[in-house]
Amino acid sequence: MDSALSQAEPPVVASALARRFGKVAALAGIDLSVATGERLGLVGPDGAGKSTLLQSLAALLDPSAGRCRVLGFDTVREAAQIQARIGYMAQGFTLYERLSVDENLAFSAGVRGVTGDTYRERRAALLAMAGLMPFTERRERELSGGMRKKLALCTNLIHRPPLLLLDEPGLGVDPLSRRELWQMLDDLRAQDVTVVLATSYMDEAERCDRVAFLDRGRLLALDTPAALRARAAGTTFAVTRAADAPPLPAALPGVRSIKHLPDRLRVQLDSGRNGAEAQRLLAPLGTVQAVEADLEDVFTLLAPPGEDAATAARPAHPIAAGPGGGGISTQELTRRYGAFSAVDAVSLDIPPGEIFGLLGANGAGKTTLIKLLCGLERPSAGSARVAGIAVDGARGALHRAVGYMSQRFSLYPDLSVAENLRFFASAQGLAGRRARAAIAAAAAESGLDAGDPRMAGALSGALRQRLALACAVLHRPRVLFLDEPTSGVDPLSRHRFWALIRNLAAAGMTVVVTTHYLEEAAFCQRLGLMQRGRLIASGTLAALRTQAELAADAGVEAIFLAHLGRAA
Amino acid sequence: MNARRIAAMLGKESREILRDPITLGVALAMPLIMLLLFGYAISLDVREAPLGVLDLDRSPLSRQLVRQFTDTEYFALAETYTDLGGVEEALRRGSVKLALVIPRGLARERQRREAPQMQILLDGTYSATANLLGGYARAIVAAADPAPPAIEVRTRVWYNPSLRSINDVVPGLFGVILMAFPPLLTALAIVREKESGSIQQVFVSPLSGPEFLIGKLLPYGLIAFLQIAMVMAVGFLWFQVPMAGSLSLLLAAGGVYVLCTVGLGLLVSTLTGSQLIAMLLALIITLMPSFLFSGFLFPIFTMPYALQLYTAIFPARYFIDLSRGVVLKGAALGDLWLNLLLLIAYTAAVFALAVWRFRKKVA
Amino acid sequence: MAVRLAGLLAKEMIQFFRDRVMLVLILWLYTVEVVICTVALSFAVHDLPLALVDLDHSPASRALATAFAAGDAFRVTARPARETDATAALQAGAARAALIIPEHFTRRLARGEPAEVQLLVDGSNSTVAAQARAYALEIVEDHARDQAYRLGGPAARPPLGVALRSWYNPAADLERFTVLSMIALAALMVGVIHPAASIVREREIGTLEQLRVTPIGTAELFIAKTLPTLLMGLLAVFPSLLIARLFDVPLAGSLGLFLAYTAVFLGSAIGLGVLVAAIARTLQQALLLAFFGLFPLMFLSGTLAPVESMPAFLQRASVLSPLRHYMDVILGIFLKGAGLAELWPQGLALLAIGTALYAAAWAVFRREFG
């Protein structure tokens, strides 16, 4: 297709690539080569430079040092040649909300000179592949998150690009839509399309030919998933704890990380520890069993301990239960918009101190349910009590009892960390010594520096997420609602975040959380599955597995799909 | 340049505009509202201004003077006073705009062929009004005392003999309206894409900078042309503004000017990534100058020299000169080539700057 | 309540002062733009370019020409020898008026016949043309009287003297008016645009929703969204006051009263801003709507054209423009030293408009947040 691309030259070659923003080095000394037809995954903590690398490859950013050749063209001198050929999907949505599915696709084809029969054929094929055929007239803003992503991918495939750059394609997309998205990517393999994608989903990284691990602008590892997993082999163990086991010590030498699953601990040791040493270290904790390492373990191993660490304090005082208890109970709770029921007769009971996970596709009603329970939306029918307070009653009491963290980590980007905390403290009516104490406690529990002078808009996603959490728990709510709190955050930070949630729940806070990372479902005590506004199943993971008549080793995804299938 | 790509850009842009009723509504309703306000509100005459009278002379002459004031349509007798304190209070309260103070003995002094003095007190706060009323008052007093005409002035007002202000407001408004909206609309449309990030999709495509800018320019240019057409239609048909020159010359110059104003919008959009700042910038570099420093309302020759140079930075004055020349004076290209040349040069410079500033880069 | 409000206010203040570019632009509107306009704009025509054609070449004709050159109104830019040159200058726009003194001017004067001169005025700016005509007539008339009185002709009767005194603004120049009206305009623009933009922006980034899940009530949120603009509007007045000083505009009345009225005025502007924010879905729409609302208010205020010269229906409509009342207030306080005794009707009107807008904004706000 491209005469300039010689047989010998790979589609992507970066040599000593560096990029600075002011004093910050976003990329430093990157050497990278991607072969034709290869699928390369970029992983790494927030601020590692994944987006900067992709933008450099897309010729959207000029390097500060080094150079980059894409499809045989130089990204500085021949940017137009590159941009005319490749496909690029930025993080977040980049389509036009006032245009329909068809119009967005036609625009993309038009600017790329795809017309006539070629366009009609490709349009039909792409829309069929994305399952968007029935919605061609629908405006972009009326699509669900998953459909938007699929449409964005279609607009980038209309000109059959030899190279596709994708920045977090699965961000905010439900598991089902993500499967469809990946089906589309798999279909591209036959066409020898080279794909470079950034992701925070380890299952997506697993599906790449090679994975590049970035941290603070440097390339720490570049290898096949299997080879990377081998690096962490022998470092991971499952520890089953007896019911009466003593509490975990605050720090264990040689232990890299501990993940708390409802029925066991998953412990990772620093590399280089052998099996016998592991037994000696872990035996006092419970029954030890070696398990296979996955990419997430590699991630944990490679990422240097973060600035924050799991040093977050546990709440010093238990959360007061209050007169009505701290749980949630709803009866036939319904919210209709016209003829459409966003939440349809949901009845559920969540006891105080429980972590309750809500799963479901984009548009299944999870967010609306949370908004109903926070008093942000009025129920059309049914009733609900949160911490003993009716949600359709007086707002004041309800809002003192609940904390809410929205999907978008809504903070003031032009206020510093400290100013955001101070503001939200005063918004809760806290002043003087009480405010200082609350800020100190919330910051400690979230692993934040309460005096951080940086603007919230300049923080990495993981830090913004923790700041949003701190702001939501300043007033020690009895019930905490987290709407996709871990969206777009790297695995390590997600685990640290879950440690915070667990601490809060242990102190008596009820936590309702939605997520698209199915592995996180395992951290919840109970789960609720939603589909088209209805709660189609709820219970522990084990109970859901039994209900779906699945084998004991069935994963979350299988359980999720089985229930959705049964309900449909 | 690729026509097909530009067409795709145009199609997308037009659909987005058509589906935003508020923006479209403001863009089309606003020029008409401006025209109607200007058409009806700006007139030379102050009518029935409240007049206060303090007549201490109470002579036939003083009564005749007062009658001469009230007989005109300019003044209406609102209050009479018995002492100067009443006059002062009325002026401070603002209940009269002008007070006639006729001193005791005016008629007697006149009989004795001394130089009699009367006083007219004006509320100078609204100085434009004060100036107008002062002029009327002088003329009335002069008329009350006719001297045999020694020198007769035969005045002829050219181009607008009836001195109807709408006749020069309409061609002036072409320049103002095209500077008020197209730059703002264009700048906001692009900066909005920057804020939402959808501009990155455009960056990573074969669409070149100039093609993108043309795709933005044409729809907003078309809206601008619609605006000017509406203003012309209402001006010529409803307000009966006469057209002395050639419509095609006016339209051609208007075309250049539209390019120029939309180009300014494009330029503003390359300077900032925030809509609020784009709006404030547009306010400061396009709207206010076109209103105030274009000769539209305030003549440029009365400004200090340094500020006359300042007005030369903004293109509105060249176009307003031109459109008034064509509409009122019937001027032809031969008279106006310099203005047209300046406009073309200005437009070319604006586009060169915009294209130079517009980079397909995120940072 | 007090804590929450204080927190909200502190937050708004920090945000306001952090956006440097916006601050500079707003400050520009309040200061530089005020200065430029004040120096540049004048309704009173002076230095009008005049082409003078003297075909008589006599002492009398030269005396008349001198009379034209002596005043402020005209500046003789050309003295062409032929009438056609003068008309060409008019057509080209090089001259805005032409005075033609014909041959035999002196002879006719001497014979006691009315001597005729011709004045051509460019009517392409009718305001300017009308003033030019009036000035020219005045100059000629004064000149003729002067000559007649000096020569002591048969009709030599002393003219009726008129002392025209413009109070509060002795020179009746536009400077004082412009300074004050530009300050009022800046207050109006910032008062409408800032709250509209800040509310729509919070809605776009989602923090508005976050605020709703706190004990902050509708009333507090409403106050928090309006009070900072009010405070900032009041603060921003001070640099302008310095500029007013610079232009020798006295503050004849009370500063406190001025600030109180300014607060009421800003209240109505903010009410409009909040209304705009309630209608608009995007920042783009909010900004355009704000613009849409600002223009008629500005127009009907008397800042651009005297309200007295408008047709009756517009004069009645102008009562609805808060800027119009505020102009009365600001001119009254600064130039006349007026107090509450004179300005209470404007106060009532401002309060009524402000209350209506505030109430409408409140109703919309409540429906959205309540």
Image (cartoon, coloured by chain):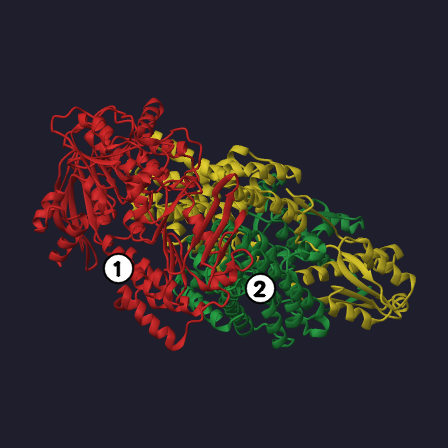
Q: Is residue C293 visible?
A: no
> Between residues B79 and B363, which one lies in front from this camera angle?
B363
Kind of residue at badge 1 = Glu
Q: In which quarter of the image is residue C221?
A: top left
Q: In this view, does A103 lie above or below C341?
A: below
The hue in which chain B appears in the rendered picture of the protein: green
Kind of residue at badge 2 = Leu
Crowding near the residue tagged with mark 2, few <14, some 14–19, many ≥20 C-alpha atoms within 10 Å: many
Colour red, chain? A
Residue pictured at 75% horizontal, 55% vertical: C47
Residue pictured at 25% horizontal, 56% vertical: A179
Side of B53 where B276 appears, left or right: left
Q: Are marks 1 and 2 on the same chain?
A: no
**Quick check: marks 1 and 2 in contact, CB under 8 Å?**
no
Tell me the residue that label 2 is attached to: B173
Side of A412 where B243 appears, left or right: right
Image spot of residue C308 (x, y percent): 56, 55
Q: Can residue C117 be seen in this view?
A: yes
Q: In which quarter of the image is the C terminus of chain A?
A: bottom left
Image spot of residue B226 (x, y percent): 50, 70
> Between residues C267 and C257, which one lies in front from this camera angle?
C267
Q: Mark 2 lies on which chain?
A: B
Task: Give the label, 1 or 2, closer to the camera.
Answer: 1
Image spot of residue A535 (x, y percent): 14, 50
Q: Quadrant of the N terminus of chain A?
A: bottom left
Tell me the residue that label 1 is attached to: A180
Colour yellow, chain? C
Image spot of residue A447 (x, y percent): 33, 31
